C-alpha cells in the first residue's frame, strides 16, 4: 500500500472553537489537489488524452454511481466540495466556504460568484436545489423518462427527504436557496460529516435544461466543470469532452478527453499496447510486465516521466457477505470458522501478484479510524478455524457434513478468487458448491436474501468510517446495502451517536467502538483491500489519480 493517509485534520483542525463548527474550505485553485499543478503557469498545453473506461451506468449526476460514470461526471461537474487526498483536507469547489450550526443540523454553503454552466447559465443556489430535488423526486422529468435514481440515499439525511422520495410533494423542504450564492441545508438529524457527502458528484448542480429536455441532457449533460461534452455519449463506443474555456477555476491544460469504451480490460490493454490509449487498467496477467515496462509511480498515484504504473492503495474492501438472517450463517461460530479458514495472503500474492493487501477488517488503511488487526476473525488460522467449526459439526472421516453454496459472478477474475476460497474450506472439512448467476441476477438474490454467502466489494463514496459502517451494518440499511441483514441494536446506537457527534475525535472513537462490536459478531468476511492497477503511456507528462480512482484531468498534461 502506498503511504497516503486519508484523514480529516483540515476538516476539523482548529475549527472547533467555543464548541461550534466552522468548516472553512480552502479557497485556492479549484479542482486541483496539492502538487497537481504544473510549472506551465496554468497555460493550456493541448492535446487529447485517450482514456479507457467500460460502458457507464450513467454520466448524469442524477444516477452516477460506479467508477466509469463517476470518472466522466467529475470532469463535467463541480460539486460543492472535494476531498484532496494529498493535502488530507476537504476543500471548496463550487462552494468557496461553508459553516454549520452548533449541533450540525444546518449547513450553509457560500458559492463561488460568477461561475457558469457550459451553456452560460449561472451556477446559483437554485441550481443545487434543482439538482438535489430531481435526484430524489420520483416524478422528476428524468425519473419519468428513465427510472428513479439509485443514489438518492446520499441525500436521505436532509429534512423533507422522505416526503419527496415517496412522491408526496415536489418540494425539498430542507434545501433553501437563500440568495444566488447561499445554499442552506437543514438535516433531519445531526450529522457532522455532511460536508463530505456534499463532495459526491451526484450532488452536483444542474441548469434548467436538465428538466426541460431530460432525455437529451441524460446523454449530453451540461455541467460547470473544467470540461464539457463534445457531442453525446455513444453507448458502448465513446464519450468525448473538450476544455471549458469559460471555467471559473484554472483552465485545463488538455484540449480534450476521449473516453474510449471497451467491454473488458483485456481488450483495452491490447489497444493500449498498440498505442491507441494513454490510460488503462491492467489485466492481472500483465501486472508484472507492466510494472517493468511502465515504471512504478513513487507515490502510487501520480504519473510522470518513467513512472507510468500506479499501484497506490484505495479505500475499498473486497469481502464475502454472509446471510445472517438464515441458516447456516445465522450461527456465529460457523461465520468465524469460515473466516479463519481463508488464506487471504495467498490470494493476494498468487492471484494478484502482491498488488492487493489481505484485509484485517472492513475499514481499509487510509481511512481515519483504521486500526491494524481490528477484526480478530479476519485472519488465517487453520487451528482456530477447526476449533470454531468443531462447535458446529465435528470432523468425521475428513468431512463435517457441512455443505455451503457460494454465490458469485464469474467475470472480472472472481472465479479464481472463489475457487481459492473453496479450496481453503475443503481443507477444514467444509464442502462448498458454486452458484454463478450474472451480476444483475446475483444482486437480486442478495436483495431478496436468497443466498447463503457470496462476494461483494465496497468502495468509499467519501473517505470516512461512517461510509462503511452505516450502509453495511446499520439495521436501517437492511434492504439496501446491508446485504448480510446484520442487526445489532448496540451497533445501531453507537453509529447513530457517532453521526451526531460534533467533535471529530469523539466521532471517530464511537465509530471505532461500533466497528469493534461488528468485528466480534463477524457478520461478513473481509478478504482484501484494493489498489490501483493503472498504466499510462509515455505521452502522459503528468496525471494524478487519487485513492478513490478519481482522475484529476483538469491538471493532466501530455508531452509535446
Image (cartoon, grey):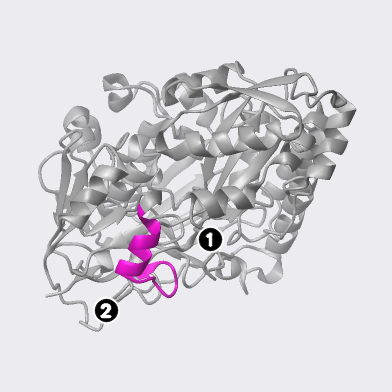
Mark 1 in CB contact with mark 2 (< 8 angstroms): no
On screen, residue 293 versus residue 391, left or right, reads left
Q: Residue tagged by mark 2? A: 38
| Badge 2: residue crowd in 10 Å (few <14, some 14–19, many ≥20) | few
On screen, residue 168 versus residue 64, left or right, reads right
* Residue 334 position in % (x across, y down): 79, 29
Q: The magenta stretch spans which residues?
A: 286-302
* Residue 132 position in % (x across, y down): 40, 38
Q: Is residue 321 visible?
A: yes
Question: Looking at this view, is 123 or 154 the one in front?
Answer: 154
Which secondary structure lies at badge 2? Answer: loop
Q: Earlier in the sequence, mark 1 or mark 2?
A: 2
Quarter of the rendering containing residue 3: bottom right
Q: Residue tagged by mark 1? A: 99
Question: Looking at this view, is 376 or 101 the one in front?
Answer: 376
Which residue is rendered at x = 11% and y = 47% of the image? 230
Quarter of the rendering containing residue 491: top right
Amino acid at each position: 500500500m502506498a503511504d497516503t493517509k486519508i484523514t480529516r485534520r483540515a476538516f476539523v483542525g482548529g475549527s472547533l472553537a467555543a464548541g461550534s463548527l466552522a468548516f472553512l474550505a480552502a479557497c485556492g485553485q479549484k479542482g486541483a489537489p496539492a502538487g497537481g499543478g504544473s510549472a506551465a503557469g496554468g497555460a493550456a498545453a493541448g492535446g487529447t488524452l485517450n482514456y479507457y473506461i467500460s460502458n457507464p451506468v450513467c454520466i448524469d449526476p442524477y444516477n452516477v454511481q460506479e467508477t466509469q460514470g463517476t470518472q466522466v461526471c467529475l470532469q463535467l461537474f463541480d460539486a460543492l466540495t472535494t476531498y484532496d487526498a494529498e493535502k488530507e483536507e476537504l476543500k471548496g469547489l463550487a462552494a468557496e466556504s461553508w459553516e454549520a450550526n452548533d449541533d450540525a443540523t444546518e449547513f450553509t454553503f457560500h458559492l463561488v460568484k460568477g461561475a457558469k454552466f457550459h451553456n452560460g447559465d449561472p451556477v446559483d443556489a437554485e441550481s443545487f436545489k434543482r439538482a438535489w430535488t430531481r435526484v430524489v423526486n420520483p416524478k422528476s422529468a428524468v425519473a419519468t423518462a428513465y427510472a428513479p435514481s439509485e443514489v438518492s440515499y446520499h441525500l436521505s439525511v436532509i429534512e423533507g427527504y422522505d416526503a419527496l422520495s415517496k412522491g408526496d410533494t415536489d418540494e425539498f423542504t430542507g434545501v433553501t436557496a437563500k440568495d444566488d450564492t447561499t445554499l442552506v441545508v437543514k438535516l433531519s438529524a445531526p450529522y457532522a460529516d455532511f460536508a463530505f457527502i456534499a463532495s459526491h458528484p451526484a450532488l452536483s448542480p444542474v441548469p434548467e435544461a436538465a428538466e426541460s429536455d431530460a432525455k437529451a441532457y441524460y446523454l449530453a449533460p451540461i455541467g460547470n466543470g473544467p470540461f464539457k461534452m463534445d457531442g453525446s455519449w455513444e453507448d458502448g463506443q465513446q464519450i468525448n469532452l473538450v476544455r471549458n474555456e469559460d471555467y471559473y477555476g484554472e483552465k485545463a491544460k488538455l484540449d480534450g478527453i476521449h473516453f474510449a469504451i471497451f467491454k473488458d480490460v483485456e481488450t483495452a490493454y491490447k489497444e493500449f499496447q498498440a498505442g491507441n490509449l494513454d490510460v488503462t487498467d491492467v489485466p492481472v496477467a500483465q501486472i508484472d510486465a507492466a510494472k517493468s515496462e511502465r515504471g512504478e509511480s513513487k507515490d502510487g498515484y501520480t504519473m510522470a516521466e518513467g513512472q507510468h504504473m500506479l499501484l497506490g492503495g484505495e479505500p475499498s474492501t473486497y469481502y464475502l457477505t454472509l446471510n445472517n438472517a438464515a441458516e447456516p450463517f445465522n450461527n456465529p461460530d460457523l461465520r468465524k470458522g469460515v473466516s479463519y479458514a481463508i488464506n487471504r495472503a495467498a490470494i493476494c500474492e498468487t492471484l494478484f501478484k502482491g498488488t492487493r493487501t489481505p484485509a484485517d477488517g472492513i475499514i481499509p488503511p487510509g481511512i481515519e479510524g483504521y486500526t491494524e488487526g481490528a477484526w480478530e476473525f479476519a485472519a488465517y488460522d487453520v487451528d482456530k478455524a477447526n476449533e470454531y467449526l468443531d462447535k458446529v459439526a465435528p470432523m468425521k472421516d475428513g468431512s463435517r457434513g457441512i455443505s455451503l453454496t457460494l454465490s458469485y459472478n464469474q467475470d472480472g477474475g472472481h472465479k479464481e478468487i472463489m475457487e481459492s476460497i473453496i479450496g481453503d474450506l475443503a481443507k477444514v472439512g467444509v464442502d462448498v458448491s458454486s452458484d454463478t448467476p450474472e451480476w444483475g441476477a446475483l444482486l437480486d438474490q442478495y436483495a431478496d436474501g436468497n443466498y447463503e454467502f457470496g462476494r461483494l466489494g465496497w468502495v468509499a463514496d467519501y473517505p470516512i468510517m461512517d461510509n462503511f459502517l452505516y450502509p453495511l451494518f446499520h439495521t436501517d440499511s437492511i434492504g439496501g446495502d446491508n446485504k448480510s441483514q446484520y442487526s445489532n441494536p448496540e451497533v445501531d446506537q453507537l453509529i447513530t451517536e457517532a453521526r451526531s457527534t460534533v467533535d471529530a475525535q469523539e466521532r471517530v472513537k464511537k465509530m471505532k467502538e461500533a466497528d469493534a462490536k461488528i468485528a466480534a459478531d463477524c457478520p461478513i468476511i473481509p478478504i482484501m483491500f484494493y489498489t490501483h492497477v493503472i498504466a499510462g503511456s509515455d505521452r502522459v507528462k503528468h496525471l494524478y489519480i487519487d485513492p478513490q480512482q478519481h482522475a484529476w484531468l483538469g491538471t493532466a498534461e501530455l508531452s509535446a
